Amino acid sequence: MDYNMRSMKAEEFIHDGEIRATLAYAEEHKNDLPLIDRILEKAKLRKGLDHREASVLLACSDEEKVKEIYDLAEQIKKDFYGNRIVLFAPLYLSNYCVNGCLYCPYHLKNKHIPRKKLTQEEVAREVIALQDMGHKRLAIEAGEDPVNNPIEYILDCINTIYSIKHKNGAIRRVNVNIAATTVENYRKLHEAGIGTYILFQETYNKEKYEVLHPTGPKHNYSYHTEAMDRAQEGGIDDVGIGVLFGLDNYQYEFAGLLMHAEHLEAVHGVGPHTISVPRVKRADDIDPGDFDNSLSDEMFCRIAACIRIAVPYTGMIISTRETPEVREKIIRMGVSQISGGSRTSVGGYAEEERPHDTEQFDVSDNRTLDEVVHWLMTAGYIPSFCTACYREGRTGDRFMELCKSGQIQNCCHPNALMTLKEFLEDYASEETKKLGEEVIRREIETIPKENVRKVVRERLVKIIEGDRDFRF
């Protein structure tokens, strides 16, 4: 069985032998400065790198070259995504699960965690609470349980979420992070109007994967790894991938992650819409110390930088698993989306005090959404609640073409400013609102086209007057 990025078989497009050869090559050439210079020159063309080239950069130990990697990653992010950071929140629907995943407290054998599944009335209360915070984009999460969490339940929840309009609030994009499923079910999700379908691989090492998933349908490595191909067949052209760093050797996971992105690009003509970089965190009966593959904050940031360089057009996500300090460091390395005000418990948003009994993992950044928005602006970023591309049909290859050509800047930048204005008018504290108004005044001047600046100014006045949901 040879490596073949175009194959539809998991063990051929995520090929163990190719990964191990890549890691050996990276170790051999980690101090080969002429080669590293050639790779960096190629990266500056903004066309991306293959998994072997990127692995050399990840292994590089030369301090000067590492700084070049960081600087290039930051510049590439600015070139394609500007200084915008999109905000979202996870919404946990159910922690019923039939799998035996060793790193997740929702595993079937955990008998002391309370099991909970939201009713549609409870989903509505959660959505109202999230709208009252200012969120417009959600990622729904649920354990795998065909009895308690069938696809019909997920579809009902999506319908409920989109139906709730509270005051000026509305959830305009629902991303879905549920277990690998069938083409037919992906088609149903597509017809329900979801945004991105997200599924983390956890680990690309098949042997380790099967140990970590001893029981349940998730034990099937191939079915899980091939899920994105079935999603594409079902009409979902925005897919998000990721691994749970800490479960296995990070170099192996990094190479596998990029090989997955290469496979999607080769077969479907468009790579992943997003790549997430979560790390194993403490939760109920889960101790990160049980896994001996933890990585330093420094290497975590290096991974993010090398992903940004290797797949320059792809969105990158960092969650509230990480502390504010780590998020502040890694956001410079190419991150384009972050969660804010997150609660990882089932039904957690409607509670005044943060509940911990049904959390999937400990949240390390406990700041409110308002505090996260204020922090981003202080750090020089534009917090964005924009969902326009999905709603205007700019998904899949259409989004990527706009991103690659730089044309996305002509719509994303003004859209970000208008959605920020909505947040400032409806949800922000006085301190955040004051800072936000200064940011908007400054950033309007950076919009290249005068006619667009004129339209944005007119719409900002209409937002003050009560109108909502403008978009380019």
Image (spheres, rainbow, N blue to C red):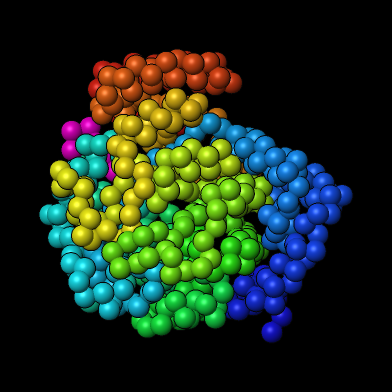
Left or right: residue 9 compared with residue 140: right
Residue 63's place in the image compared with 465, above or below, is: below
Residue positioned most to the right: 34
Position in image of residue 217 (x %, y %): 38, 80
Q: Position of residue 472 (x, y in %)?
A: 46, 31
Of residue 40 and residue 284, the one placed in the foreground of this image is: 284
**Residue 391 shows in the view:** no
Q: Which quarter of the picture shows residue 387?
A: top left
* Residue 371, horizontal then vertical, whole percent: 33, 32
Task: Return the x and y of residue 218 as percentages of the image width and height.
Answer: 41, 77
Say whether residue 325 is left or right of residue 49.
left
* Outermost residue to the front: 289
User: Which region shows up in magenta?
Assistant: 166-173
Closer to the camera in the image, 389 or 337:
337
- Please count the marks in the image: 0
Please state which of residues 406 and 255 is positioned toward the viewer in this rendering: 255
Which residue occupies 56% across, 32% down? 82
Q: Is residue 424 visible?
A: yes
Q: Which residue lies at the image location 33% right of the left edge and 50% below the top edge?
A: 363
Based on the picture, tell me whether residue 67 belongs to the magenta stretch. no
Image quadrant containing the N terminus: bottom right
Above or below: residue 217 compared with residue 403: below
Residue sitting at the far left: 121
Residue at the spot 21% in from the left edge and 60% down from the top edge: 357
Measuring 54% from the left and 69% from the top, which residue is drawn there? 248
